[in-house]
């Protein structure tokens, strides 16, 4: 990963993004606020379990809104590699979240 780009920095950016979204969407009562906090916590924990390259790319694409071309340039990889890492990152994130959901019985259908 090029200097100045790290998984920790990407995760910090993701946390700020979630915080801004949460603050701008404050509606409902305490139950809804608790559910939003729980979802945020679950996603952050799941992200930490991803391989660093997948986590960084997923955050850059989904939460920072960068295009594949921009991500590839920053990470010094091809656009196809960026797309592949995003695909595998999303698949792994889904597996982690479903596993957490099943083991803790916290998902609501």
Image: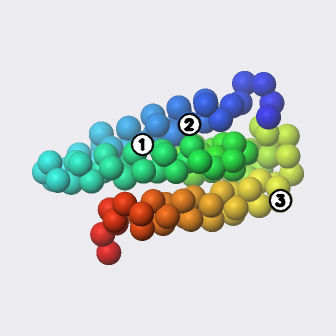
104 or 14, which lies in front? 104
Instruction: Pick out the residue farthest to the bottom.
Output: 109
Relative height, residue 84 to residue 61 (above, below): below
Q: Which residue is mark 2?
A: 11
Q: Which residue is mark 1?
A: 18
Relative height, residue 59 to residue 80 (above, below): above
- Tell me where residue 30 appears, x and y as whole percent: 14, 48
User: Considering the image in quadrants, where does the C terminus appear?
Assistant: bottom left
Q: Residues within 10 Å of mark 3 (few under 14, many from 20)?
A: few
Q: Secondary structure at mark 1?
A: helix
Q: What separation in Å lies between label 2 and label 3 (alpha carbons)?
A: 23 Å
Q: How are the residues colored? A: rainbow
- Tell me where residue 79 appears, x and y as whole percent: 82, 54
19 or 47, which lies in front? 47
Q: What separation in Å lies between label 3 and label 1 (alpha carbons)?
A: 27 Å
- N-term mark: 2 or 3: 2
Q: Nearer the viewer, mark 2 or mark 3?
A: 2
54 or 49, which lies in front? 49
Q: Secondary structure at mark 2?
A: helix
Q: Which residue is mark 3?
A: 80
- Tell me where residue 46 appears, x and y as whole percent: 52, 51
Q: Residues within 10 Å of mark 2 (few under 14, many from 20)?
A: some
- Quarter residue 23 falls in: top left
Q: Nearer the viewer, mark 2 or mark 1?
A: 2
């Amino acid at each position: 990963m090029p200097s100045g780009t790290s998984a920790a920095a990407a995760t910090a950016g993701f946390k700020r993004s979630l915080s801004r979204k949460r603050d701008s969407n404050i509606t409902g009562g305490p139950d809804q606020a608790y559910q939003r906090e729980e979802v945020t916590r679950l996603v952050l924990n799941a992200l930490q379990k991803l391989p660093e390259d997948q986590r960084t790319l997923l955050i850059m694409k989904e939460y920072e809104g960068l295009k594949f071309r921009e991500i590839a340039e920053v990470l010094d990889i091809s656009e196809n590699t960026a797309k592949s890492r995003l695909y595998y990152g999303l698949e792994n994130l889904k597996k982690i979240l479903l596993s957490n959901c099943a083991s803790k019985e916290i998902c609501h259908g």
